[in-house]
Amino acid sequence: MVSAVLVEQREHVLVVTINRPQAMNAVDAEVSTGVGEALEQAEADAQIRAVVLTGAGERAFCAGADLKALGRGQGILAPGHEDWNLAGYVRHPISKPTIAAVNGFALGGGTELVLASDLAVAAETATFGLPEVARGLFAAAGGAFRLPEQLPRKVAMEMILTGEPITAARALELGLVNRVVPADLVLDAALELAGRIAANAPLAVQASKRVALGLVDGKIADDAAWDLTNREIMGVARTEDVREGTLAFAEKRKPNWQAR
């Protein structure tokens, strides 16, 4: 059986690959477990000084939550570690720096993985966006509050409220990513950046990250934003609109919103 997450150590860097290219690297419970466990491994191993997260294949970094799994009534979070949230990553901060190597489109949860990363390198062909509002949902894995923190507020609000994506070039201009490179060089560029980090004193790097993020005992003080997100998504998820949005997406038609 092929693993949904591949983990490889390259010198002092742990490379974590979401390995579901046939599903555009969409996140299911196996992905959330595998990525979350890889982060735990990185945090516990003194030889690991940085983590690179990427996706298998050339088309997608991550398409977000696996809607087919959700449609079958299956959970997409790591069993027993639901607090890690989407992909075992977006609410699972570690002291080791994390770098997203965005090898293709990063939509919905894919963009939320980038927002949860410390640094990001993107392929020229990558796109970023939070299209959840077009499905009757909203970006509940941190995107709705992290995007306005990391981009100019009005730009972020346009992306959140329209659901329209931006290109890699625009993401670089806005500071959402650190580098944009040809698609075949994304992982190499991320590893080069990770190597520059790993060349520094590891304890000083980790302390710097904890101070920069306000990371205390493995947690960042953003509980109020998460609490509000969780309350809102519970209400939205019960609406007729979310069912209509999901059905319209599957049927490739324009949704008929009822606001109820």
Image: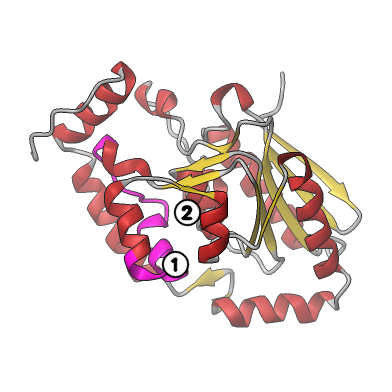
Q: At x 35% / y 58%, what residue is drawn?
A: 144
Taking the image as shown, residue 54 lies to the left or right of residue 204, namely left
Disc 1 target residue: 151
Residue 50 image position (x, y, % from top left):
77, 61
Graded by Cα atoms within 10 Å as few (under 14), some (14 to 19) or many (20 or more), the crowding at tag 1 reads some
Residue in the image at 68% along x and 57% along y? 99
Q: Nearer the viewer, mark 2 or mark 1?
A: 1
Does residue 92 appear in the picture of this structure?
Answer: no
Quadrant in the picture for residue 240: top left
> Is disc 2 surrounded by few (<14), some (14 to 19) or many (20+) residues within 10 Å?
some
| Dot 2 amino acid type | Asp
Q: Which mark is residue 67?
A: none
Type of amino acid at the residue the image marks with label 1: Leu
Q: On the image, numbered disc 2 is attached to which residue?
A: 83
Indicate yes or no whether the magenta region holds residue 141: yes
**In this picture, is 208 found above or below 107?**
below
> Which residues are drawn in magenta?
135-154
Local SS, label 2 = helix
Foreground pick, 133 / 242: 133
Q: Earlier in the sequence, mark 2 or mark 1?
A: 2
Residue 182, percent from left and from top: 72, 44
